[in-house]
């Protein structure tokens, strides 16, 4: 009996390992740009001086949209967007933004943000731009006009993660990461070598 249990456990470990390896390989093949590059800029956008941590006990256990995840487990995007909104004058915590998006049908079932819901949850003050392809030019243009790029990268094991860009020092983008409690923004290149997606939060025109 123990032998069969051992074989079953080994099979589960093998399947889990294979899934991680497949996901990691897929990530490496996905279109991406380097985490440094573009224009040589030296600027810092308004920044509250703190990071909205997705695991903050005030909201970590809250359900993310209508998904099976929570803000603590999968709330990096909502936390990053909340920071961008707050820096643009619409003060929101991840908890508040999550609730507003729920009421405005601003989530897909798996917890992804519906970007055209951002004006609805910010009283028309802000907008969100979805871009099918990432580029340094896109990020630099946003920063130069006081807008906040929100970028996707992958953690170990192929887990997608988002953070908000709040400035640039030369070719280095400066980020607030909802998994890191840093007093100052960190270089994006310290978090990842590649960027896989860019969204932009800006004031509505």
Image: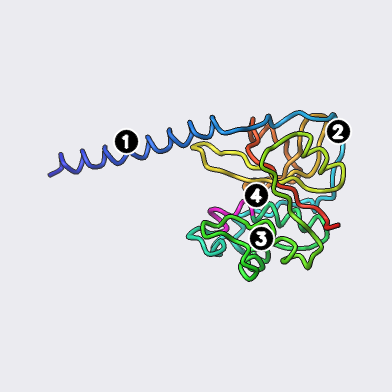
- Mark identifier at residue 94: 3
Question: Tag 1's secondary structure?
Answer: helix
Image position, residue 28 (x, y; %): 54, 30
Q: Are marks 1 and 2 in contact (CB under 8 Å)?
A: no
Mark drawn on residue 41: 2
8 left or right of 122 in image: left
Magenta-colored segment: predominant secondary structure: helix
* First along the sequence among labels 1 and 2: 1
Out of 28 and 169, give the one closest to the viewer. 28
Mark 1 and mark 4 in contact (Cβ < 8 Å)? no
Task: Name which of mark 3 and mark 4 comes first in the sequence.
Answer: 3
Q: Quadrant of residue 155?
A: top right
- Mark 3 falls on what kind of element? helix
Relative to 177, 4 lies left or right: left
Residue range in magenta is 71-77
Mark 4, Cα crowd under 10 Å, few <14 / some 14-19 / many 20+, is: many
């Amino acid at each position: 009996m123990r032998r069969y249990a051992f074989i079953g456990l080994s099979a589960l470990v093998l399947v889990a390992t294979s899934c991680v390896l497949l996901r990691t390989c897929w990530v490496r093949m996905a279109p991406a740009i380097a985490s440094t590059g573009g224009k040589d800029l030296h600027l810092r956008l308004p920044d509250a001086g703190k990071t909205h941590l997705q695991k903050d006990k005030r909201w970590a256990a809250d359900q993310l949209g209508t998904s099976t995840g929570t803000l603590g487990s999968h709330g990096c995007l909502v936390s990053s967007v909340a920071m961008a909104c707050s820096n643009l004058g619409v003060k929101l915590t991840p908890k508040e933004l999550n609730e507003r998006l729920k009421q405005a049908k601003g989530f897909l079932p798996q917890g992804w943000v519906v970007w055209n819901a951002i004006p609805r949850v910010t009283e028309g003050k802000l907008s969100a731009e979805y871009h099918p392809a990432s580029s340094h030019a896109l990020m630099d243009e946003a920063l130069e006009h006081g807008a906040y790029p929100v970028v996707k990268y992958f953690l170990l094991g192929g887990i997608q993660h988002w953070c908000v860009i709040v400035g640039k020092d030369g070719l280095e983008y400066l980020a607030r990461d909802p998994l890191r409690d840093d007093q100052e923004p960190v270089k994006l290149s310290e978090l990842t070598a590649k960027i896989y997606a860019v969204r932009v939060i800006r004031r509505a025109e």
